[in-house]
Image (cartoon, grey):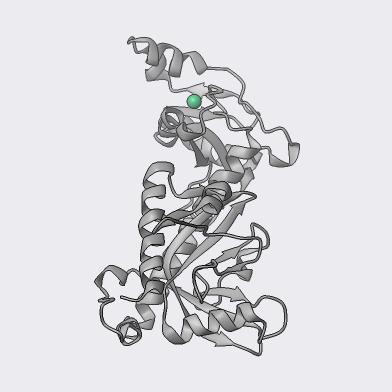
Amino acid sequence: MDIDLQIRLAAFTWLSEQVNLHGDVLSRTLLQQGFEFQGQRIPLVAPQGIFKPQILDLPLSITTAPKGPYDDYFGKDDFLIYRYRGTDPNHRDNVGLRKVFELKRPLVYLHGIEPGKYLATWPVYIIGDDQTNLMFRVAVDDALPALDYSQSDISHQVAEVSDARHAYLTSTVKVRLLQHLFRERVLDAYRSQCAFCRLKHRELLDAAHIIPDNLPEGKSTIENGLSLCKLHHAAYDSFMIGVTPDYVIHVRQDILEEEDGPVLQHGLKGLHKSKLILPSSKNHYPSREALEWRYSRFAKVG
Ligand SMILES: [Zn+2]
């Protein structure tokens, strides 16, 4: 196996370990430090989007900054769009990525969720080069472990993975990205605390949908979200707790009548008639229409 592939595989192994340790969203600091390969530190990001570490001849990662609407990142066919660096197709970074395309080398794709935080996806492959629109098409592929890198013709093996499969895999990345963006934005809006109990441990917080996201009205927006700890997210989702359109928390009658230990007493019953903790910015307040929609269903259950 050539050194280029060895380094790419070492990068993937390192990323898997980091995701196991820290979860899906990785910090820029961590990615900047990178991993060690034969005594040498290899970072995974740099200020420019197309990144080639010194040790390699070809780019290892592509990064998208945390800004802009989704349409910037996903084409109509669900493949990722990666824009050229600048407008010159022959800029060395663009040439490097084109070479990666020709040689079918796997890359790391880093998508900025918010400043300093990235969702890493690997391996991804460049599957198209559009010089007219100054962009590459990128597909996610999970076939990597099955590829035999000792063979020189891995490009042939990659080509065997069908377009439909690439499109499917890439669309799952889109879903993941949306979920993470939703979580980060909602948690930030609520200053990293549970809107019911003020618990301030981000690891224990979720972004809950007020109108569930399996319904067309259930948008992944801050106004349709609540930052809730795991316990209160589950309690809200199972209609044990409701929130009125004027931000008052209600606990279901049968729960109020139940007698049990401190978690039930303080964690659930104690919330009854208390006020929802609201985001710092009024623009981020939960939508009254969404709360109304949800509360009317809670009231029926209660
Ligand atoms: Zn809570």
- Residue nearest the viewer, comparing 67 with 245: 67
Residue 7 falls in image quadrant: bottom left
In the rendered structure, the answer to whether residue 160 lies left or right of residue 58 reads left
Q: Residue at x 50, y 55 (%)?
A: 119
Q: Residue at x 33, y 68 (%)?
A: 142
Kindly give the residue lying farthest to the bottom in the view shown.
132
Identify whether 159 is placed above or below 124.
below
Residue 227 falls in image quadrant: top right
- Residue nearest the viewer, comparing 196 with 137: 137
Q: Residue at x 34, y 13 (%)?
A: 258
Q: Quadrant of the N terminus?
A: bottom left
Identify whether 38 is placed above or below 286.
below
Q: Quadrant of the C terminus?
A: top left
Residue 145 x %, y %:
27, 68
In the rendered structure, the answer to whether residue 213 lies left or right of residue 154 reads right
Residue 194 falls in image quadrant: top right
Residue 38 x %, y %:
39, 59
Residue 220 visible to an observer of this rendering? no
Residue 52 visible to an observer of this rendering? yes
Residue 113 x %, y %:
58, 53
- Residue nearest the viewer, comparing 210 with 126: 126
